Image (cartoon, rainbow, N blue to C red):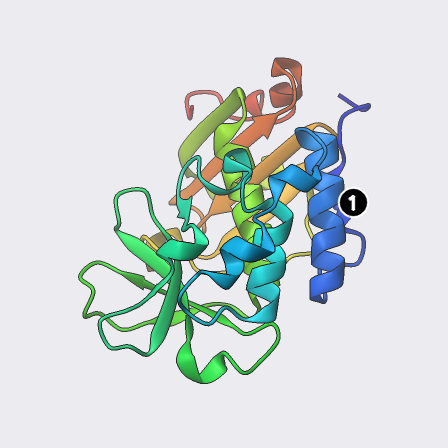
């Protein structure tokens, strides 16, 4: 396990701007899955034919990983450039959706003037309010890559309704990723979402104890032992 990929070390002092976010994505993908290649990105021609205005950083994301379905479309779905669209009000540009369309992610029209604008999300019926998700598209891209990689990993376990003591026992074995907390679209009881890691191991915790839900993915089955041994009866 100690030879496994270390996401905390790869993120360094955090994805504090788009450039650092893309550096982390490259490092993470190389260490966790398979290195990025030129063919993994969407062509400039495809971006130009999107039909809606894409902010600079969203275009950068598509150019980097837009064709890597393992990073963008395993659990929820990054829309293809030509599928990006305005919501019913015409005020939010939608670029990602939950796998059953229970939630959508987008960018407010008024924020498109920014190179790396904030991202909002909406749940349930399409007439519901859009709520803050993450402060930058580049952060939302990192979140997407982490989540899609987590759920797409062969060696994964989940555990729910963790008490404070059990959760604390797990966290003593992990280090937090230098990444901001953010809301889980399913509601306040499973928010915020927090990320942790150890070499060879990636962990997402949704919500606080005693209702916390933990997801852990390992590069090999043995990596999961770092957390599974603390969770008897929970997973």
Q: Which image quadrant is residue 81 in?
A: bottom left
Q: Quadrant of residue 10?
A: top right
In this view of the protein, which residue sits in the foreground, 128 or 87? 87
Residue at image position (50%, 36%) is 69
Q: Position of residue 4 (x, y in %)?
A: 76, 26
Q: Is residue 39 left or right of residue 210?
A: right
Residue 26 in view: yes
Q: Residue 176: x, y in percent?
A: 68, 48
Q: Residue at x 24, y 77 (%)?
A: 89
The image quarter in which residue 84 lies: bottom left
Dot 1: what SS?
A: helix
Instruction: Give percent across and percent down for residue 97.
Output: 35, 52
Q: Nearer the viewer, residue 203 or 107?
A: 107
- The residue that disc 1 covers is 10
* Residue 192 image point, x, y percent: 46, 57
What is the quadrant of the C terminus in the image?
top left
Query: Can you see residue 14?
Result: no
Q: Nearer the viewer, residue 207 or 165?
A: 207
Quarter of the N terminus within the rendering:
top right
């Amino acid at each position: 396990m100690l030879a496994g990929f270390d996401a905390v070390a790869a993120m360094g002092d955090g994805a504090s701007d788009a450039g650092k976010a893309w550096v982390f994505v490259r490092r993470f993908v190389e260490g966790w899955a398979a290195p990025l290649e030129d063919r993994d990105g969407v062509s400039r021609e495809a971006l130009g034919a999107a039909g809606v205005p894409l902010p600079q950083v969203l275009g950068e994301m598509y150019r980097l990983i837009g064709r890597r379905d393992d990073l963008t479309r395993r659990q929820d779905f990054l829309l293809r450039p030509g599928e990006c669209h305005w919501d019913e009000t015409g005020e939010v540009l939608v670029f990602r959706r939950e796998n059953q369309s229970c939630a959508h992610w987008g960018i407010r029209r008024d924020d498109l003037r920014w190179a790396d604008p904030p991202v909002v999300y909406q749940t349930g019926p399409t007439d519901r309010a859009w709520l803050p998700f993450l402060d930058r598209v580049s952060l939302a891209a990192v979140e997407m890559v982490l989540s899609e990689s987590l759920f797409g990993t062969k060696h994964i376990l989940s555990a729910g309704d963790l008490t404070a003591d059990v959760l604390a026992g797990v966290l003593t074995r992990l280090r937090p990723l230098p990444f901001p907390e953010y809301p889980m679209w399913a509601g306040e009881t499973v928010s915020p979402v927090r990320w942790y890691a150890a070499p060879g191991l990636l962990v997402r915790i949704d919500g606080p104890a005693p209702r916390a839900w933990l997801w852990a993915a390992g590069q090999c089955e043995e990596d999961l032992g770092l957390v599974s041994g603390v969770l008897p009866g929970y997973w």
